[in-house]
Image (tube, rainbow, N blue to C red):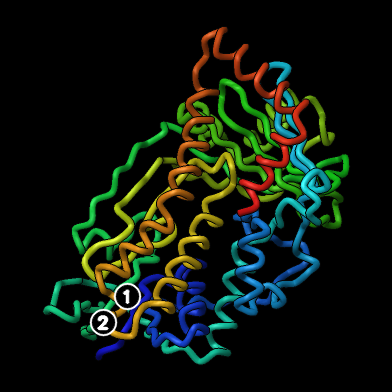
Amino acid sequence: MKTPIVVCGTGIVGLATALALSRRGQQVTLLGPRQTFAPATPEIFHSRVYAISPASQRFLASLGVWNMLDAQRLTAVQAMEIHGDGAGLVNLNAWQAAIPELAWIVESGEIERALTQAVQIFGLHWLEEKFATYSKAGDVDSGLTTDRGTVMQAELFIAADGAQSLLRAAAGLPVDSKPYGVTAIVAHLNCSRPHQGTALQWFNDQGVLALLPMPSNQAGAQVSMVWSLKESLAQELLALPVAEQAAQLSVRLAALTAGRIGELTLRGALHAFPLSLNQSPMIGERIALVGDAAHRLHPLAGQGLNLGLGDVEALVSVLAEREVFRSAGDAMVLRRYRRARAEPVLAMRLVTDGLHRLFATQSPAAAWLRNVGMSAVEKLPMMKRYLIAGASR
């Protein structure tokens, strides 16, 4: 079969890419399994959540997806409280930048559910098969074969199939990957004090702890934890029996947070995934990479999905606005996409990797410098507005 554009990957970024292209009048085929979703349960929340920036929220709204989300499962982040490993403290509030909220905390499963429904409503061509092989088929089209033997030819293939992208690997595109030696521990917790819509973050010599505000449940206030721990410490915690995990986690979190939002109680299972810094060339011959297939960051700034949706928005704009004589996979068109994303991706990589390196350095001089720097930022309203504006893009 022949089609101008094929999107490989049916996660959030893949679904958003296909939907956005179709809404801009581009002919597109979505390739990958179709996930089914059970009705949402009030007391059960998806284990993975995202901090959706105002820019990403506007993009999802432009796709008709944002209003499909259950408002009772969304939490507005009104403020951020960032603690250093000493006296350093930075408070960021939405009102400081005259915006309604800094971000929205949304479950991964709920975004996928809404995107899947929107794609179905819009009537996109969805081939529910899996990628198998890829090869250059000629001067105009490239070829892809699925696990069921379907041969697809297209002007452009978009890899939206995650950090371990099979399409990227099959096309021979390199990825520079640097493991951090850190494992992210993810779980939901009940807290005995209200979070008041504040995202909390602590940096210390063990790693980075983030507590994100979530909707309340029958047991009270709730937060989502992302604790980026050194591998040895993470494995110690994960190796404990389930009951001991919960007890140890409560003790460690109480010591680290100093009871900022009261007692923290584990709600459900712990999930873990290793962290790395990945970067690719973003494009190949008639191939464009988006989301985790293109880059992967440390989650300390919570910007991974936002950066991926920024990729989608830029790529769709470049493709929709190309000259009529250029194909979707034209080298000039793809270079425009890479240029459009070069600065945002580099800036976010420098920030996240730089912060990781800064707090991973344990010398007294470095500790003094970073905490003094945080205290200085706390006293500079213009710097706070700059930080908020950067995180809102």
The residue labelled by disc 2 is 154
| Along the line of sight, the residue nearer the viewer: 311 or 198 | 311
Rendered location of residue 174, percent (x, y): 24, 51
Q: Is residue 347 above or below residue 283?
A: above
Q: For the point 73% across and 36% down, which residue is it?
A: 382
Bin the neighbour count of mark 2 within 10 Å (Cα to Cα): few under 14, some 14-19, many 20 and up.
Answer: many
In this picture, residue 80 sits left or right of residue 327: right
Indicate the quadrant where residue 215 lies: bottom right
Q: For the point 68% across and 27% down, which residue is it?
A: 252
Q: Is residue 251 visible?
A: no
Rendered location of residue 239, percent (x, y): 51, 34
Rendered location of residue 354, percent (x, y): 49, 30
Q: Is residue 117 visible?
A: yes
Indicate the quadrant where residue 278 lies: top left
Q: Is residue 265 above or below residue 117?
A: above
Bin the neighbour count of mark 1 within 10 Å (Cα to Cα): few under 14, some 14-19, many 20 and up.
Answer: some
| Along the line of sight, the residue nearer the viewer: 326 or 101 | 326
Local SS, label 2: strand
Q: In the image as oriented, which residue stretches furthest toward the left? A: 138
Rendered location of residue 255, percent (x, y): 73, 23
Q: Amino acid at mark 1?
A: Lys
The residue labelled by disc 1 is 130
Q: Amino acid at mark 2?
A: Ala
Task: Indicate which disc, 1 or 2, sits on the residue closer to the N terminus.
Answer: 1
In this picture, residue 335 sits left or right of residue 388: left
